[in-house]
Image (spheres, rainbow, N blue to C red):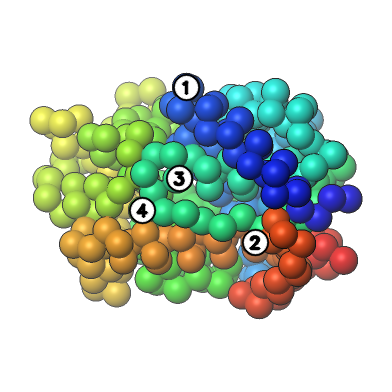
Amino acid sequence: MIAAPAPDVLEAIIADLSELISSKKCGSILIRLSWHDAGVYSKKLGGGCPNACMQFTDAGEGTFGANAGLPTVAVGLLKDIAHKWCPAHLSAADLWALAANVAIKVMGGPHVPTRFGRVDAKSSAASVSSQVGRLPDGDKGVDHLREIFHAKGFTDRQIVALSGAHTVGGCKADRSGFEGHWTENPHVFDNGYFREMLAKKYEPMTVAATGNPQHKHWWSRTVMLVSDLALLEEPAFRIWVEKYAEDQALFFEDFAAAWHKMQELGYANLKDPFGGSLCNTLVKPDAVCAVM
């Protein structure tokens, strides 16, 4: 297994990803792909890690409702690049992580370093058993967010920072059960999610196609989910919403750190592109996922 692509190869892969993201405006779904690949990790439930298991659609993570659209649309967008570079230079799971980080940067967000050595699942049998308790539901509040993210090792501050990824992209009823963009500039990675959340008044509504509750700002047509507005209800969350709305640099710094941690959940010794072994001490690795 190649632990990390050579620097010149990495530069070429990044160029291919940048071209794809710029031409297809697909950065947000690539971010979602990496998040859902890594986000199944849970200390409480055990197991889960970024391993590209969603590429298998016969069972497991590739069939989870929360992952709707990812095995087809997102993986499909990366198909040519994956065929060109994987597995000779990096695993599919590494490519998914790198693609998200390139997307964040291309859309104006912070640089997030990518380390390599994730191991691809061989089949859907490597999947976690369920999305329940691992991936958050958009129609639930503070207690649910804490249950999901504390089990991954995240603090309240980091929960808010990670929620800021909603500054790009949006929801589609046939994938998530919700509908609409969070911000007026869904292809720009900035702190608009927090600024708009504080500045706008959102009215409750029901998604016609699914019956799910959400909220809409009727003039701009932007939306917030129950889980988004929950950040304003809890003082320990709201303080960071307000800070990030005022200070984009602080948001970028906190987001980059929390996102980097998310992408390495379950791994202990991923490597930088120059061959250095850098131990991730943020989480205790699962034996099935740790690179030996």
Pointer 2 local density, CA inside 10 Å: few below 14, some 14–19, many at least 20: many
Q: CA distance from mark 2 to mark 4?
A: 19 Å
Asked whether residue 59 appears in the rendered view, the answer is no
> Mark 4 is on which residue type?
Gly
- Does the CB distance between marks 2 and 4 fall below 8 Å? no
In the rendered image, the vertical position of residue 154 relative to residue 168, given as above or below: below
Q: CA distance from mark 4 to mark 3?
A: 12 Å
Q: CA distance from mark 3 to mark 2?
A: 17 Å
> Mark 1 is on which residue type?
Ser
Q: Position of residue 2 (x, y in %)?
A: 84, 50
In the rendered image, the vertical position of residue 29 relative to residue 231, given as above or below: above
Q: CA distance from mark 2 to mark 1?
A: 28 Å
**Front: mark 4 or 3:** 3
Residue positioned 16% across, 54% down in the render:
198
Quarter containing the C terminus: bottom right
Residue 141, quarter of the rendered image: bottom left
**Mark before the other along the chain sequence, 4 or 1:** 1
- Does the CB distance between marks 3 and 2 fall below 8 Å? no
Q: CA distance from mark 3 to mark 1?
A: 15 Å
Q: CA distance from mark 4 to mark 1?
A: 24 Å
Q: What secondary structure is marked by label 1?
A: helix
Asked whether residue 103 appears in the rendered view, the answer is yes
Residue positioned 75% across, 49% down in the render:
6
Q: Position of residue 87 (x, y in %)?
A: 83, 39
> Mark 2 is on which residue type?
Glu
Residue positioned 56% across, 58% down in the render:
113
Numbered mark located on residue 104 in the image? 3
